[in-house]
Image (tube, rainbow, N blue to C red):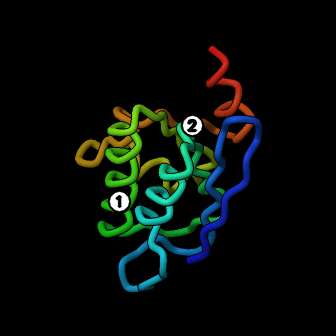
Amino acid sequence: MKIQHRNLDDVCIIDIEGDLKGEDRVEPNLHDYIKRLLNEEKKKFIMNFEKVNFINSHGFGEILSSFISINKCHGIMKISCLSKRLRLIFDFDIIRIGDIIPIYDNEQSAILSFEK
């Protein structure tokens, strides 16, 4: 897994590439990466999943931990560019991440939603 970010005005876009799972032992992991950006006073986040093919339970834990840390810092997190397969998992009755984290079909829609 590879994590990078880019800034568009006051929105921090997190580009994730590869599978999001615990076996990767990537340093920093997604949650640590987000905490570092929060320490830099970032408040608006979009997680771009365009290049993610697989997420396991550990990966969902990283996403939820990131969401909680962002909320504690009075920030906002949104998700964009899920594949159809991942979207089904995010909306699955047991997980239902889409109920707590807004999901957008594309990055532009997610960016524009901050303006509303």
Residue at screen point 32% across, 45% down = 68
Q: Position of residue 79 (x, y in %)?
A: 54, 43
Kindly identify the amino acid type of the residue bearing the numbered disc 1: Phe
Q: Label 2 belongs to which residue?
A: 44
Residue at the limit of the structure toward the top, as seen here: 116
Q: On screen, 63 above or below 110?
A: below
Q: Name the secondary structure under disc 2.
A: strand
Q: On screen, 91 above or below 25?
A: above
Residue at the limit of the structure toward the left, as seen here: 94
Left or right: residue 111 versus residue 21 is right
Residue at the limit of the structure toward the front, as seen here: 40
Q: CA distance from mark 2 to mark 1?
A: 20 Å
Left or right: residue 95 versus residue 17 is left
Q: Name the secondary structure under disc 1.
A: helix
Disc number lying in front (2 or 1): 2
Q: Position of residue 17 (x, y in %)?
A: 63, 70
Q: Which mark is residue 60?
A: 1
Q: On the image, which quarter does residue 70 sit in? A: top left
Residue at screen point 60% across, 64% down = 16
Q: On the image, which quarter does residue 73 sit in? A: top left
Quadrant position of the C terminus in the picture? top right
Q: Position of residue 33 (x, y in %)?
A: 50, 64
Kindly identify the amino acid type of the residue bearing the numbered disc 2: Lys
